[in-house]
Image (cartoon, grey):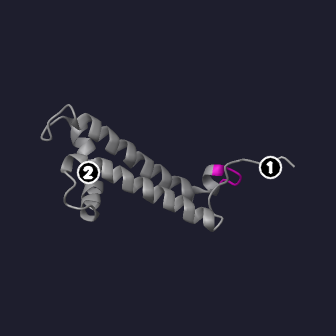
């Protein structure tokens, strides 16, 4: 491994954080594009959004109450992913495994 590189020193933090962020932005893109197109649109971009986000929406739908409509489920899934991202950062920070913010005290 490359020593001294902040990415490789904290790869266990950065890779899951990046994947969760990519899912959040993909869900946001699907939600915004869904405002303008029909759910059965056969465009390859829409199909890619659906293929990438359907597992996340299914998981969020399993833990979300039934009164939440399918149209709002991407927002709920984004919320759950943000919670997971924050909890992951907090747990790693608690155990001293998260990267520092680069702030130094002036003493």
The question of residue 68 being in magenta is answered with no
The residue closer to the viewer here, 82 or 99, is 82
User: CA separation, marks 1 and 2?
Assistant: 43 Å
In the image, farthest residue toward the left: 40
In the image, what residue occupies the spot 21% across and 42% down? 47
Q: Which mark is residue 27?
A: none
Q: Secondary structure at mark 2?
A: helix
In the image, farthest residue toward the front: 67
Expressed as whole percent of the image width and height from the top left, the position of residue 40 reads: 12, 41
In the image, what residue occupies the spot 18% across and 34% down? 43
Q: Main secondary structure of the magenta part?
A: loop
Bounds of the magenta span? 1-6
Expressed as whole percent of the image width and height from the top left, the position of residue 35 reads: 22, 34
- Quickly name the residue at label 2: 73
Total number of numbered labels? 2
Horizontal side of 59 relative to 6 (left or right) equals left
The residue closer to the viewer here, 52 or 82, is 82
In the image, farthest residue toward the bottom: 95
In the image, farthest residue toward the right: 107
In the image, what residue occupies the spot 44% across and 57% down? 83
Q: Earlier in the sequence, mark 1 or mark 2?
A: 2
Which quadrant of the figure has residue 89? Answer: bottom right
The residue closer to the viewer here, 93 or 15, is 93
Judge whether 65 appears above or below 47 on screen. Answer: below
Which quadrant of the figure has residue 60? Answer: bottom left
Judge whether 95 appears above or below 31 on screen. Answer: below
Within 10 Å of the Cα at label 2, are there few (<14), some (14-19), or many (20+) other Cα atoms? some
- Quickly name the residue at label 1: 105
Horizontal side of 98 relative to 75 (left or right) equals right
In the image, what residue occupies the spot 54% across and 53% down? 14
Horizontal side of 72 relative to 28 (left or right) equals left
Expressed as whole percent of the image width and height from the top left, the position of residue 44 reads: 21, 36
């Amino acid at each position: 491994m490359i020593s001294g590189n902040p990415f490789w020193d904290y790869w266990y933090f950065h890779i899951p954080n990046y994947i969760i962020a990519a899912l959040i932005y993909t869900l946001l893109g699907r939600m915004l594009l869904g405002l303008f197109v029909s759910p059965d649109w056969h465009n390859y971009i829409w199909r890619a959004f659906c293929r990438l986000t359907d597992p996340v929406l299914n998981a969020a739908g399993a833990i979300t109450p039934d009164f939440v409509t399918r149209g709002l489920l991407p927002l709920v899934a984004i919320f759950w992913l943000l919670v997971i991202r924050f909890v992951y950062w907090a747990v790693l920070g608690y155990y001293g495994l998260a990267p520092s913010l680069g702030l130094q005290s002036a003493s």
